[in-house]
Image (cartoon, rainbow, N blue to C red):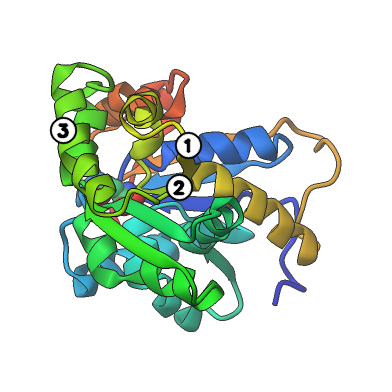
Amino acid sequence: MSSSIQPQLPIGIFDSGMGGLTVLRALTNKLPNESFIYLGDTARLPYGTKSQDSIVRYATQVTKALLRYQVKCIVVACNTATAAALPYLQHTFPHLLITGVIEPSAEKALQATQSNQIAVLATETTIAQASYQTTLRTLNPQVNVVTQACSLFVSLAEEGWHHNDVALATAKQYVTPLFDATPTIDSVILGCTHFPVLIPLLSSVLPDHVHIVDSASAMADTLQQLLGEQQLLLEHTPDTPPRTTFLVTDSPTRFANIGQLFYGAEISPTAIELIDLQ
Ligand code: DGL
């Protein structure tokens, strides 16, 4: 697949906006030698309430844009785009390694569960696409999967309301009915880029025995393995320091301000390029 692709090229990664910076952060921690080109489709966010047709169209445009920047692979950081468009992208760009966040998270949850009762918290479209449910049950037909669309978590995360009274009430409202109905759930997948910043909140609401699987760190382990298998991993420190480039389709200033909540570090607006996908 990758014979003409050089390991020195950057890794392309995309999301509907800034939530995917949680995934970028996990990837840069895991793969410190690598350079990244991150594309946030901020003009069209959120993806989580859009139809599959729209997301396939957006994801195709984003992939073509990243290819113009010469990347060695593409990570679909957005759970919604993975659920709605990953098979289409893999079919449409067969010579490119394109990978998404759902399978790595499903594998981690299956490793963690002892009761075979797994909950998935995600956006409306991710749940409606049933990719988590299908992937988990394909990997282990014994598993029971319960789901909850948690659209308000996206707004709370972007607002920086990660642990106040509103966030707490919202988390209880989403999560309590799941555990009332299925008390034996012992693994919860955070199937949305925004949710890792809510882990302290969710830990305070979920029963103590529950294992939280976040798709960002699951993706980092899988990407390292996939790049290694395809001889695309940068094994040595590169001659020039690794670089992360940010591309957005709307307001670099807003991306920089809100993005730092997810990236865990400052992003200078001057490091962000505004691009047009049309
Ligand atoms: N990035 C999306 C996801 O992981 C969440 C935000 C959105 O709805 O666009 O599903």
Foreground pick, 234 / 135: 135
> As rendered, which of 259 and 252 lies closer to the eye?
259
Q: Distance between the Cα atoms at labels 2 and 1?
A: 6 Å
In the rendered view, would you say 20 is above or below 84? above
- Mark 2 belongs to which amino acid? Asp
* Mark 1: few/some/many CA within 10 Å (<14, 14-19, 20+): few
**Rendering coords of residue 137 (x, y %):** 46, 74
Tell me what residue is drawn at x 74 percent, y 71 percent: 4
Q: Is residue 36 left or right of residue 233?
A: left
The residue pinned by badge 2 equals 186
Mark on residue 170? Answer: 3
Q: Which residue is mark 1?
A: 209
Query: Mark 1 near ligand 1 (CB under 8 Å)?
Result: no
Q: Earlier in the sequence, mark 2 or mark 1?
A: 2
**Kind of element beneath mark 1:** loop
User: Is residue 41 among what the camera can see?
Assistant: no
- Residue type at numbered disc 1: His
Which residue is pictured at 84% across the width and 46% down the height?
Answer: 235
Q: Amino acid at mark 3?
A: Thr
Q: Badges 2 and 3: C-beta atoms under 8 Å apart?
A: no
What SS does tag 2 mark? loop
Disc number lying in front (1 or 3): 1
Q: Is residue 42 visible?
A: yes
Mark seen at residue 76: none
